[in-house]
Image (spheres, rainbow, N blue to C red):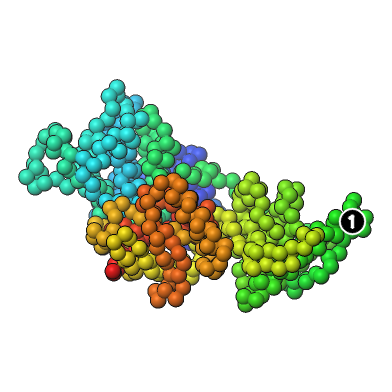
Amino acid sequence: MATKVNWAAITAESILTAIADHDRKGQQQFLSDAGFRPSTNFRLVHQGRFYDSKAIVGVANGHATTTFLRSGDFTGGKAAVVKNLDALGFIVDYRDDDGATGGLLWDLATTRTHTDGVVRAPYKYIVLLWAIARRQRGLDPAPALRDMRTELGTLLAPFAVSDTAPDPEYPWIALDGHSWWNLRIPENLRDAPRRHLRSRNIADDLRGGLSQAVSDRIDTDPQWTREALALLTNLITESGAPGSIDELRSNLNLAPLTVALRYPPKPSAPRREHVEVSVQRRPVERNETAEFTPTAPDPEKERRSLRREAALQNLYVAYRESAGCVVSSRTITIDDRTEIPTVLSIDVFDDTAETLIEAKADIRRETLRTALGQILDYARHVPHQHTALLLPESPAADMTALLYDHGVDVITPVGAVADSDGVITAVDSFTVNRSPRSLAVLAADDTLWNDYSQAVIELHLPNSTVQITPTDPITANDPSDKVIGSDMLPDEPLHILAACHPGEDPQSSTATTRYRKLRDHLHARGYTTWDATGGSVDLAYSEPSIAVAGLTDTEAQHIGADFGQVAFFTLTRHHLALRACTSPRTTIRRYALTM
């Protein structure tokens, strides 16, 4: 009798533990011990490596429930296994066709390549990796080899497996017929021998690029794309050819490959059986004169410091409340039953922004290190979206980097007026300089992301102003080479960058100054720019932006993050892509272009 898989108990961690068992034992021993045969169609793909999906599920069930299932105990396949693994965040490679032996990723792994028995020529893999990078950047999906020859030659040369540099036309033409590649061969040359196509005067005119099936997956499935990139990276690395995969990915503007531990340690829960933690919400204390310790080494110095801190905190709370936000505080009581309970007081908790805030009176290294320890301690006990330090001014770059490494934002006053003791008595506003982690949290907010994805862009080109209005998301049936922008847009992609922080008034002095710095930053590096405006459909809200030619998506991400942006746009003649600056989130849409 078939046994039902306990999908309610199986978690992603259960699957990863089964994968770790497979990696330790190797496929043959793993399948023998678990009672399974190798998969012939359905394969789980993790970090660019293949695993027998049904066997992994049977072992994962054992890790989750202590009941290890064997092959005859349950049914595999699309309905039983694929759907549930997909829900847990895993990719399963397969085809629906009868007798299929795998899907697109398996096709890639089984690509025929030239080998001398020791080293495999990775040229096809490199061309496909290059084609994915172009697809992600919105470049011409089917360029002629003539225009790509120099670029491809430079990428292939370090991986040469013979004394002569590889000719780009060999992988370009040899990939014809592969499920990943579309080579546009003129009808009159369809039956010509391959060696005839490789003559330079013919090869240069051949247009090639990713197949429609692969292009559709890249446009609509970021997780599948990450596995494809990881698989290609593994294939190139394991080919035995010289050359650096890290340099290749860098040259293609692909993010460095981050691979989790192959044998993820099971996290041990902290010993809290004798610890009781309680968190109480309370109003913010509005201190007019802060308490201080008379026995401190310098009581007067401490009094001034606490007074500056209290004044800064009061001004921030008043500023947020004047904007209609809810601000409170928290008291944390920790009782480990061994001594008097520890009581921790959080300076400010911004309920509206879900931000845990610690205020400090100065930006000395020792002060910031203390504040960082405090906020990390508080954050363990109080649910939040963001953490931040409220400071009188921006810290040095080194300390800012330390705070950002721990996901801590920096809040500082704008237009501050201080008295003779350095106590800030008035401010125009406050600005939040967000860490990359904080920007990623904002990008994960579906409401905010949807607002961004529907933004209308006015692009002020030299001879005209055009309006870009997003329309429907790209679907699997949407032609990848459909041209919208025509000759009104430049040939190369444009990146639309702004400098206004989330929730900030675009007309404020801080936002205006930051916009000028962005413009100067781009001009100093020789980029061609055009003025642009981004905002709501009726442009009731808008903020100044800059359209930039000559950037890659990776470069635009870095600049956007440096200027505190959640996301930026990539505009091509084919689509409009909204890309997060510090996370992989991307939405690609068609658009309407009007004059």
Quadrant the N terminus occupies? bottom left
**Residue 302 falls left or right of residue 148:** right
From the top left corner, tell me how far across and down residue 288 is, in percent.
Answer: 81, 70
**Residue 93 falls left or right of residue 391:** left
Which of the pair 213/444 is nearer the observer?
444
Considering every residue shown, the one lying at the far left of the view is 188
Q: Which residue: 75% across, 58% down?
A: 361
Which of the pair 195/250 is nearer the observer?
250
From the top left corner, tell me how far across and down residue 128 is, in percent.
Answer: 30, 43
Q: Identify residue for label 1.
A: 299
From the top left corner, tell me how far across and down residue 249 is, in percent.
Answer: 40, 41
Q: Which residue: 66% across, 71% down?
A: 319
Q: Secondary structure at mark 1?
A: helix
For label 1, the crowd category at 10 Å Cα-Cα, with few meaning under 14, some 14 to 19 and many 20 or more, is few
**Residue 306 falls left or right of residue 536:** right
Q: Quadrant of residue 530?
A: bottom left
Quadrant the C terminus occupies? bottom left
- Judge whether residue 382 can be spotted in this image: no
Q: Quadrant of residue 377?
A: bottom right
Which of the pair 127/235 is nearer the observer?
127
Q: Amino acid at mark 1?
A: Pro
